[in-house]
Amino acid sequence: MLVIFAGLALSLALATPAPLPHRRRVRAVQKTAAQAKLLRAEQTALLALRQEMLHDFLVRVGTEAPAFQDLRVQAVDGGVTVGPTAVDIDFLGSPIVRARVRNTTRQIQTLMLTAVLRAGQTTARATVIVDRLGSRESRAVELFVPEAFVPKSVSWQSTPL
């Protein structure tokens, strides 16, 4: 019985072909990586386009109402100025603050900028990080305040990072 089993195992081993050596297809792997990179770039572009389309739609349907504009340019710590500022109220009743930040120094600055909004006894804060603001450069910032109220004034604070 053992001889029959050994003979069966030997015939099975001889009947199966030897495994072929595996050759890596470098060109196919490179092509696949390039295709994946292209796909990621296309997806990123599509998401950016969808975001722009949503923004345009929200502006077009008038989901924001102006609260006030502050035309002053306020100096904050570290040679940074903020202003003019526009505050709008979105369709949920939350303020959206838009302002221009300027670096008046000769150094690149990274800072945490905080808008302090006030309406009577109510105070709310919104913070944004302004990363690597170049010498004499200005940048538009937009801050969202998650509390529903209509502010009457805005002041600015900054913390260098």
Image: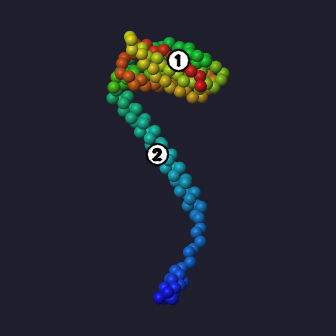
Judge whether residue 20 can be spotted in this image.
yes
Nearer-the-camera pick, 25 or 118: 118
Circle 1: element type: strand
Task: Specify how the rendered protein is coloured.
Answer: rainbow
**Residue at position x 47%, y 42% in the image:** 45
Judge whether residue 102 can be spotted in this image.
no
Q: Earlier in the sequence, mark 1 or mark 2?
A: 2
Q: Residues within 10 Å of mark 1 (few under 14, many from 20)?
A: some
Residue type, label 1? Gln
Q: Quadrant of the C terminus?
A: top right
* x then y, percent, for residue 103: 59, 21
Furthest residue in direction top, as rendered? 120
From this view, report whether residue 55 is shown above or below residue 84. Answer: below
Q: In the rendered image, which residue does mark 2 sit on?
A: 43
* x then y, percent, for residue 25: 58, 64
* x then y, percent, for residue 8: 49, 85
Nearer-the-camera pick, 13 or 67: 13
Residue type, label 2? Gln
Q: Residues within 10 Å of mark 2 (few under 14, many from 20)?
A: few
Furthest residue in direction front, as rendered? 1
* x then y, percent, for residue 3: 51, 88
Horizontal side of residue 136 vs 125, given as left or right: right
Label 1 to label 2, Cα distance in Å?
Answer: 37 Å
**Residue at position x 39%, y 14% in the image:** 122
The circle on residue 157 is 1
